[in-house]
């Protein structure tokens, strides 16, 4: 896969996304593709952007800041949308609030309050997904499902933020049926929260290895890195 060009890979992912939507009887316009560019070079981001990709996801604040500057220098004509999807330290919230359009990985009230306070008033509210610890104790990230509603209600009242939905990174498994279970649980949690009056419209779920299962269970944003950019080389880039 990594021997193919980024634009070929993007086309393949778009085709798989469309096929998964068709299989699930959903319009392909319901599922947005977020290209996860962590460890990728600015040149690779520009290549994907020139092939039509607009939204990019990053996990590390300093790497993302450097990349945004480099991409803007290489290709100032590109208007990209940046999503933060990694763990959030409180001393990094200002840079996130100032430079991203979306944050998928909010799981604490303290972080949400800081993001809201630090969101510049000339920008639209920061789009937020609550990260849910859907697979239980194995993962340290994400709020427990039974604490999600309380946190969501607090976030929904913060003026600098716009709560959009839920995100999860389930335990990896190769089995297509097992892959669907945590995604179904996330969708059911979102439905329960909508029934409480929260206007959620986003389910950020599905990565390169489980995109199809996520789309079958209602994903509206898939976060795809490897299938677009090839296998990550952490040693080279970090
Ligand atoms: C790295 C990462 C992805 C992309 O994973 P791939 O398997 O490379 O598609 C998606 N979501 C999060 C939160 C990530 O950290």
Image (tube, rainbow, N blue to C red):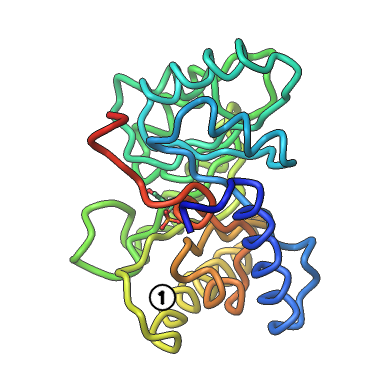
Residue depicted at 45% across the width and 36% down the height: 58
- Residue in view at x 49 percent, y 19 percent: 117
Question: In the rendered image, which quarter is residue 105 located in?
Answer: top left
Q: Is residue 54 left or right of residue 131?
A: right
In the image, residue 53 sits, relative to residue 76, either above or below, namely below
Spot occupied by residue 51 in the image (x, y as percentages of width and height): 72, 41
- Could you tell me how many numbered marks the image carries? 1
Query: Looking at the image, which residue sits at the far front?
Result: 3
Residue 192 lies, in percent from the top left, at 55, 71
Question: Closest to the observer: 9 or 203?
Answer: 9
- Residue at disc 1, CB closer than 8 Å to ligand 1: no
Task: Please provide percent x and percent y for residue 148.
Answer: 41, 58
Please tell me whether residue 216 is drawn above or below residue 172 in the rendered image. Answer: below
Locate residue 118 relative to residue 39 in the image: left or right.
right
Apparent side of residue 25 relative to residue 61 in the rendered image (left or right): right
Where is the C terminus found, in terms of image quarters? top left
Q: Please identify the residue farthest to the bottom as the structure is shown.
A: 177
Q: Which residue is mark 1?
A: 182
Above-or-below relation of 175 to 137? below
Residue placed most toward the observer, 25 or 141: 25
Mark 1, Cα crowd under 10 Å, few <14 / some 14-19 / many 20+, is: many
x 27%, y 39%: residue: 234
Q: Is residue 154 above or below residue 215?
A: above
Q: Position of residue 98 (x, y in %)?
A: 53, 17
SS at circle 1: helix
Name the residue located 70 percent from the left edge and 84 percent from the top edge. 23
Asked whether, in this view, residue 138 is left or right of residue 94, the answer is left
């Amino acid at each position: 896969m990594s021997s193919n060009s980024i634009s070929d890979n993007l086309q393949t992912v778009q085709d798989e996304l469309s096929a998964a939507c068709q299989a699930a009887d959903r319009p392909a316009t319901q599922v947005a593709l977020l290209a996860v560019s962590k460890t990728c070079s600015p040149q690779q981001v520009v290549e994907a952007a020139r092939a039509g990709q607009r939204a990019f996801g990053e996990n590390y604040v300093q790497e993302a800041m450097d990349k945004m500057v480099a991409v803007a220098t290489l290709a100032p004509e590109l208007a990209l949308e940046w999503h933060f999807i990694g763990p959030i330290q409180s001393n990094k919230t200002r840079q996130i609030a100032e430079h991203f359009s979306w944050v998928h990985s909010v799981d604490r009230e303290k972080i949400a309050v800081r993001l809201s306070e630090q969101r510049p008033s000339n920008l639209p509210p920061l789009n937020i997904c609550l990260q849910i610890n859907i697979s239980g104790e194995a993962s340290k990230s994400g709020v427990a499902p039974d604490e999600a509603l309380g946190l969501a209600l607090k976030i929904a009242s913060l003026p600098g933020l716009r709560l959009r939905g839920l995100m999860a990174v389930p335990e990896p498994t190769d089995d297509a049926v097992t892959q669907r279970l945590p995604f179904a649980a996330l969708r059911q949690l979102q439905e329960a929260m909508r029934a409480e009056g929260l206007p959620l419209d986003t389910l950020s779920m599905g990565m390169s290895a489980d995109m199809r299962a996520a789309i079958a269970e209602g994903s509206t944003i898939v976060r795809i890195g490897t299938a677009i950019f090839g296998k990550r080389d952490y040693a080279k880039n970090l």
